[in-house]
Image (tube, grey):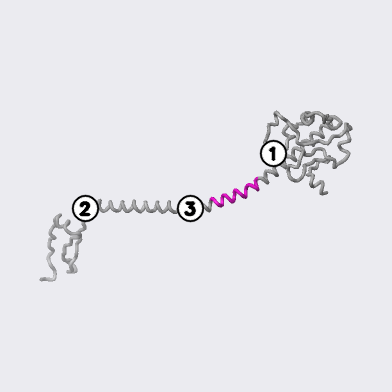
Amino acid sequence: MGRYMRAQRIPSLRRSDLSACKFVAVRCWNLRTIRPALFVFRRNRCGFADSNKRAAVLPRRQHRLQVQHRLRHRRFAASAFTLLELLVVFGIIAVLVGISFPISAQLRSRAQRVQCSANLRNLYIATELFVQQNGSWPQIEENDDDEDAPVDFGNGWIAALKPFGISEKTWICPTVQNLLGNPDISQNPRVDYVATPFDDKPTTPHEWPRQPWFAEVGDVHRHGNLIIFTDGSISDLRTVAGK
């Protein structure tokens, strides 16, 4: 053989030959390097490989769906609570509710005390205006022999101070109202603050700075009856007795 060889024509491959094996190779000679070269023909380059490609895609989709289903199951399992965790949460809620009841009751009692003090302050201002306008303390008659004497006495005070912006609600202590079951005060008005009876002289109510003007009917705030004095200060009976 000479140094160079003539180029030979590569015979064409049949379709049956390509389908019979995965890779088909034809050996030829490189004319420059005198070395054999290998030409590879892959199956996916042929038109008849579409069915094999679709068959390979279906298992991939099924595997992908299985992976997504597993991930969803893991996420649901991670977000779910166990029975022990639910019991711990319910126990914490029960403890918080048990602690909040005394605190809420204490806050409600303080709010009612503040409202009661505000009622006494309004009664004091209205009575001061009454004295300045009429020149004496309100003279409300009280008959001890009549059964309706307390009701008439309360109605007399309500009528005396009503022109000065005092309504029936101002005479009601919120704590006493709750203890009585929140009755309707529009039909049955009452007076939860007792006024000191003064004479008809204009200077009598202001002669003693620490003389009570109004006081609660009972110790409903657990610190003694609230009292408002001539100088406008408010205190409870226990504090006054301690001094």
Q: Distance of mark 2 from mark 1, alpha carbons? A: 92 Å
Question: Per the image, is 96 magenta?
Answer: yes
Q: Amino acid at mark 1?
A: Leu
Identify which residue, 22 or 212, lies in the foreground.
212
Mark 3 and mark 1 lie on one chain; the one further toward the N terminus is 3
Number of numbered discs: 3
Q: Which residue is mark 1?
A: 179
Give the residues drawn in magenta, as a range.
90-104
Secondary structure at badge 3 equals helix
Residue indicated by mark 3? 83
Tell which circle, 3 or 2, labels the residue nearer the N-terminal end. 2
What's the distance in space between the residues labelled 3 and 1, CA to CA?
A: 43 Å
Q: Position of residue 87 (x, y in %)?
A: 52, 52
Looking at the image, residue 45 sits to the left or right of residue 151; the answer is left
* Mark drawn on residue 122: none
Instruction: Determine the residue positioned at 88% across, 31% down.
Output: 200
Image coordinates of residue 138 in percent, x first then y, are 83, 31
Mark 2, residue position: 49
Which x, y percent locates residue 26? 16, 62
The N terminus, quarter of image: bottom left
Dot in front, 3 or 2? 3
Side (left or right) of 6 relative to 108: left
Is 120 situated above or below 97? above
Q: Residue at x 22, y 51 (%)?
A: 51
